Image (cartoon, grey):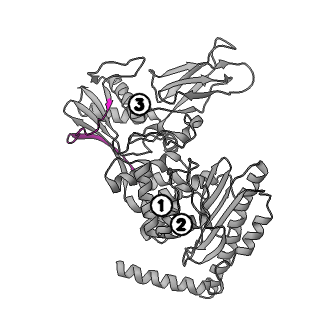
Amino acid sequence: MVNAWRRFAGCAVLTACGVAALAQPGALNEDVSRAIGKRKLGEARVGISVRDADNGVVLADFRGSEPLTPASNMKLLTSGAALLVLTPEFAFRTEVILDGDRLIVRGAGDPALADPELLSRMSPKLTVGDVLTVVTGAVVKAGVTGVREIIVDDRVFDRQFVHPSWPTEKLDRGYSAEVAGLNFHANVIEVFPRPSQDGAGSPPLFSIQPEAPWLRIDNRARTVLDGKNTVWLSRDPQANRFVLRGEVRNASQVGVEVTVHNPPEFFGQLLADQLSRAGVRIAGGASSTEGGPRGVRVAQDGEILTGGRVLAAVSTPISEALHRCNSDSANLYAECFLKRIGQAVTKEPGSWSNGGAVLRMVLSQRLGAQVGAGVTIADGSGLSRDNAVAPGTLARWLEVVAKESAARDTFTNSLAKPGEGTLKKRFGGVKLKNDLYAKSGFINGVRTLSGYLVDPESGRRIAFSVMVNDIKTDVQTAAALDLHEEVVKIADEWLAKKTTGTKQGG
């Protein structure tokens, strides 16, 4: 099989080279340069790389070797490396284990466990309560009537939940959720406010998902008779203490989201609460208004927790997690991928440190030591401004992953197409002749877009990366987004002409 693949790959490369004989490296440089010049980008820095992913020919390069802040385009490096290191057959697996009179929940770093977005896409839709009911039901069905304690073993990752370079003022927002070896409900709670019957000025009522009646929420919001809902939540960075502020005019159908602190412990408390409601006694005691249900703890360093009987297990295929990571640009997923490859290779708890080292190792192996050394890796999602990668590196990386037969389709299909994911409002008026799969990137001052154009018949593809940094104004933002689409159109026209020529030539 391996030799057959090598022979096939050799034929494919020869065919591609023949088709591209008239195209010299940089064939699209003039078109790309004109596209840049037409836009009011001011002092913004631009880097562009466009490559024929079948043969590695450089079609356009504009400062392609200059490291820039990638924003969420960092996810392309992280998710691609995860696919290569963990393999396309990998699945996160979270287990609930009965060991004597102890209940152990062993985390796998799965970011998808009860993810509210995934639950909403199921048919019929599920709630986080449904998930907890299933887990609790498995315990009750096993004949368990009481346990001494619940231990959450989250040691697949370290307990540095927050990256030090993430903006501290945004740590209560869903895209900055803490990263743990046991994640649940995307590590957020949702509050659904509704106006009080006591009239204007009175504190609104609210419900919480997941249900956690012990949480401390300081309700400083007020009911209003006119206007619209302007309510929001903030959290103490070191504890699960929240403040609800703003105005509530109508009952909210969409939850107001805020992150939770220490997700493993929080999940253990949720499970203990549900088990108690189902009649399972927790020796540690009943619910506490201050600290939640007792009898819950996280595993200690060096503690041996082996054996026992698996009562329930939840698995998430890597393909599903990749799609949330790339198409939806879910930061938690990228960070879990980074930490998980660190754990897989080093056999130590996954961390930003060892995950970053493994990512650099993979880049060095596939792109060369010099390229690996030239990438600055802070986190896996691109939320940190300390990341730096050249557009040429991103385009080459996309080319490398596309040549991995086992990983190519899974990786490509994880990217957004126009009209879906983070490209839902992009390329609406652009008619492309080829299929576009891409990853957008956005933090303040940064707009990036990288991905593939793929001929649907031949499978021939272009890899591209368009990165714009140091954007200062709304006009420059619009110009950067226009430039993304113009470069894609230029590459699309080139690919369409080349594949049309191939088809006509037989």
Magenta region includes residue 312: yes
Q: Is residue 430 visible?
A: no
Magenta region includes residue 110: no
Toward the top, the furthest residue is 198
**Element under label 2?**
helix
Q: Give the CA distance from mark 1 to mark 2.
A: 8 Å
153 w.r.t. 79: above or below = above
Is disc 3 in contact with disc 1, using a CB cutoff of under 8 Å? no
Quadrant in the picture for residue 252: top right
Tell me which numbered mark, 1 or 2, is placed earlier along the sequence. 1
Residue position marked by numbered label 2 in the rendering: 398
Percent x, y of residue 259: 51, 34
Tell me which numbered mark, 3 or 1, is placed earlier along the sequence. 1
Q: Answer with left or right where residue 158 lies relative to residue 124.
A: left
Residue position marked by numbered label 1 in the rendering: 80
Q: Which mark is residue 248?
A: none
Q: Answer with left or right where residue 304 lies relative to residue 460.
A: left
Tell me which numbered mark, 3 or 2, is placed earlier along the sequence. 3
**Element under label 3?**
helix
The range drawn in magenta is: 297-317
Residue at x 50%, y 51% (from the top left corner): 380
Disc 1: CA contacts within 10 A as few (<14), some (14-19) or many (>=20):
many
Residue position marked by numbered label 3 in the rendering: 266
